[in-house]
Amino acid sequence: ARGGITRVLDGSRTAVKSVLLISSKKGSVRASHYHKRDSHYSYMLSGRMEYAEQPVGKDGVIDKNNRKESVIVKAGDMVFTPPMTAHEMSFLEDSVFLALATEARDKAAYEEDTVRVKLSA
């Protein structure tokens, strides 16, 4: 009668240091990068996206022996991205999601930790 409670994150692997609310327009693509240290959770509040990821080797190059994997993420779903995992988000409709990160997201620190790449087919 009062509503509901949804457990979004409990017993996380690492401490969350940053929470971002991100909106994306249908047809837009975000990410196409990996982080050297940061890991993050992406919790979809509304909309839908195709989330793709692919491991990165110790040399910083995408491991082409491991296929790119993807999943459709809808409202109420969450994906986790560990460090050294290339990831890309393609928005299938206007969407809003939370990004809960284990590293601070000030511009300089974010850019130093982020390596932009193109995921393989």
Image (cartoon, rainbow, N blue to C red):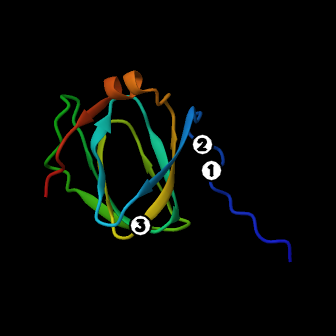
Secondary structure of the residue carrying tag 1 is loop
Q: Residue at x 34, y 66 (%)?
A: 26
Residue 9 tag number: 1
| Category of crowding for the residue at label 2, using alpha-carbon neighbours closer than 10 angstroms: few (below 14), some (14–19), many (at least 20) | few
Secondary structure of the residue carrying tag 2 is loop
The image quadrant where one finds the N terminus is bottom right
Q: Residue at x 62, y 50 (%)?
A: 9
Q: Quadrant of residue 58?
A: top left
Marks 2 & 1, CB-CB < 8 Å contact: yes
Label located before the other in sequence (3 or 2): 2
Residue 104 in the image: state x and y as whole percent. Answer: 50, 28
Q: Residue at x 47, y 31 (%)?
A: 105
Vertical position of residue 31 compared to residue 47: above or below: above
* Type of amino acid under label 2: Ser
Q: CA distance from mark 1 to mark 3?
A: 24 Å
Q: CA distance from mark 3 to mark 2?
A: 28 Å
